[in-house]
Image: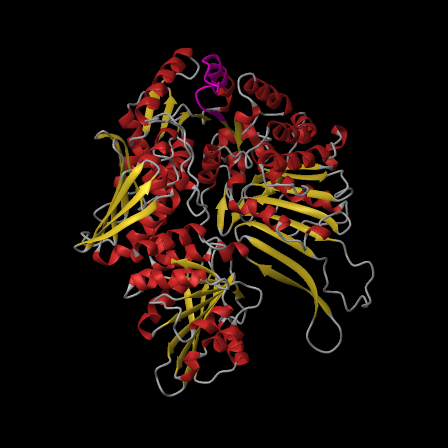
Amino acid sequence: MAETQVLQNVLRDDHRLPRVPEPAVMVIFGASGDLTARKLVPALYDLASQRRLPMEFAVVGISRTALSHEEFRERLHDALKEQRPGRVSDDVWESFSSSLFYLPGDSKKPETYEQLQGFLKELDKERGTDGNRIFYLASSPSLVPTIVERLGEAGMSQEDGGYARLVVEKPFGRNLMSARELNGEIRRYFEETQIYRIDHYLGKDTVQNILALRFANGIFEPIWSQHYVDHVQITVAEDIGVGTRGAFYEEAGALRDIVQNHVMQVMCLTAMEPPVTFDAESVREEKVKVLKAVRPIPEDEVENYAVRGQYTRGWIFGEEVPGYREEEDVAPDSCTETYVALKLFVDNWRWAGTPIYIRAGKRLPKKVTEIAIQFRPTPHTPFTRGETLGLEPNILVIRIQPEEGISLKIGAKVPGSGFEISSVNMDLLYGTAFLEEAPDAYQRLLLDLMLGDPTLFIRADEAEYAWAILEPVMRSWSESKEVATYPAGTWGPEEAEVLLERDGRRWRRP
Amino acid sequence: MIEETRSSPGGRRMSVEQIEHELGRLRMNEDGTLSLRASVLNLIVVTDEDSAESVTRSVSNIAGLYPSRAIVLISDPEEGETNLEFQLSAFCSVRGGSSTHVCAEQITIHAEGPPAEHLETLAGPLLIPDLRVFLWYPGPFSPSSPEFAGMVTLADRIIIDSAAADDCELSLREIAELLDEPETPAVGDLQWVQLTPWRSLIAQLFNPPERAGVLERLSGIEILHAPDGECRALLFVGWLASSLGWSLEESIRTGNGREVRFSGPSGEISAEMSPTSPDARFRQVRLYSDDYGFEVARSRDLSEARTVVTRDGEVLAERTVHLGHFDLGVLLGEELSYRGRDGIYEKALRAAVAILEL
């Protein structure tokens, strides 16, 4: 019998059956951390339970904490029960957990990788994982270059016996220079096609829906340009504070934590040209074109384009909350920004002269992510000024969360005699119509990763161009200790209002 | 999750305008604001009095994922006297921090006597324009039923459940004949949907390249099913035979079971179907070659399945997964999300019918 003969599994030629990835081992560095317990393993458990993982799959966790396989499994089981209360089956867990392994080791030391290689070979033999490897860097960002180097030196980035994929979590550097350095270090050992930079925001169905709305509906495309759009406002607001992440946030701030990645991605999806196909290169190429077209902010005029703010004590939804400087692990004289407002221009044929205003912050009145496209007024109105007093510009709002959908503000005649025009909001909650339970973003991204589809992952140049846009702002802010403040529960500092008022515009209330 | 069902008693004779007006009124909230109507499809259901309640429950269950205008037709053409009664409902929910209610609608029509033979004249004017129309028969279905010829003209997709028929063999034959008619829209079978997790699990067992080759060397299949599960077993065997290019040679009744012989690329394949499962219609599948064994079996509580691969009696791999949910709303939802004709199903069905006809 031809035992090694490779034949196609014809039973899978059915688009009704879910695609299941090839056998693989996922090696998680920093496996004793929060990300593994709270996001990665629950997402993998869900995938396994839903029959979306191959039988020949294993996870190997690595970190310095001394744990046995069994202790590692117990920890993850406890975390899973917290994450999925009442939804963890004992039998499924027992089956899934038999594929979880733990290797205590220092990721800086070469011997850890020798040990890992030996262990992976054993797994290939015992569990049929077929030489395919995913190296998930869930460890501290500072360890990324070392781990990549050790993997490379151990020959583990080579794809001779199966694929080798590297997953890097944000932040992708701290600025343009460090991002370039990081990308350079990673690419010494891994090809770009092997690298999956993960921004979980792109795994959200609601974010992907921006593409569906724009490119599956012919009615929007003709008006989606500077000819008809007066300006765009992108809002990513959170009502929570920094909580226990004070130490992390002190280093990051809103610009690095939210704007460089999530907001830039949303801007790209809003402004990009239609990709020819929905494959990774076409989509990412169009996103990069947007980032490249963003007009550089002159370093000596940053205050005309960017505002930073920090929340002070205030009230949110009936509850008094502390100011940023009162939070745990935050310096009492900290000037880290918890709020950012930016004015950007995408200098291309479609968007020339149309400002894109961005704001993102913590401790704002409510959690909301939305894109508002404000259209130009009609060139001429046959109605008198009195008749159109209640009329406001047309605004198309794409709400990403919490109530996913679109709303269009249009002018309509007020019923009754005379001809009074007023604005009416037409709401379409397509999210409410479809998404009773959207899959977890990590589930989607982990599956894409294993299937080798990088469409929803960040390419190196995307990360670098996003940093390049913010570079002048970061430099200018690093030289000043001044930061505007805003009471928690308000929509940001007064300076952010002024940023738009100077252009004769104002922020909309989400 | 549906939070509120709003109903209107309706009445005997209602015009289309009255129905639309009343549905609009149901969307009115207590504070005078109007809830939104969300609709992604039209769903026409032809059922009987006994099943009406469970059908309504399924329709309301899927309203969150597939908000629709559902037109539930409860017909009794054999009742001599003409009788028409209408009931209207809206399934409304609030989600995602919104203050806005979103409603799906159901129009229930009891039709007795002659109108029951012209159900398409009742359902047609009530359809929401420009949305796809699904025609669902949750109970026994026969293309020769008096209303079907008219109803099928409205439908983009017909959803039936071949397992609901008293004579499932006849049902499979009739569906196969229906599919041969060129003007028949796409047909979905809930019995086939119930096999999807099984097919997926079996197909996955052959994913490793070294095992894909075993598909050509399979020599036998054993299926354990309940006495009323033979048609499901036949569809499953039909799927394997049509996918793997097996030719049907012989079909023998063995007591209450059945044994079928095929010829494949590497010789004979025998399929044994045994009605010895006391509960689950489909309990266990085992495929084997000279050296390999592939088994998928439901757990005792039926919610999970254990898959095992053996070689020369030694276990190579095993795992336990959720088999999935099989309530009517879930099965229906699967069919509502499917587009176009399901060629794999049609081939499996024809192969199953061929076994019956040998």
Left or right: A282 in relation to A54: right
How are the colours assigned in the image? secondary structure
Count of labels shown? 0
Q: Residue at x 46, y 79 (%)?
A: B118
Left or right: B342 in relation to A95: right
Residue closer to the observer: B119 or A179: B119
Q: Quadrant of residue A289?
A: top right
Can the viewer see residue B296 in this picture? no
Give residue A322's position: percent from left, percent from top: 50, 40
Give residue A298's position: percent from left, percent from top: 76, 30
Residue closer to the observer: B111 or A355: B111
Give residue B299's position: percent from left, percent from top: 23, 45
A321 versus A454 height, above or below:
below
Q: Residue at x 55, y 22 (%)?
A: A191
A332 versus A493 height, above or below:
above
A336 versus A114 height, above or below:
below
Can the viewer see residue A209 in this picture? yes
Location of the N terminus of chain A by quadrant is top left
Residue closer to the observer: B306 or A420: B306
Instruction: Write down the region rendered in magenta.
Output: A147-166
Q: Specify the farthest residue to the left.
A: B255
Give residue B101's position: percent from left, percent from top: 50, 63
Q: Residue at x 77, y 49 (%)?
A: A504
Magenta stretch holds residue A344: no
Q: Specify the farthest residue to the bottom.
A: B81
Residue closer to the observer: A275 or A100: A275
Q: Quadrant of residue B8?
A: bottom left
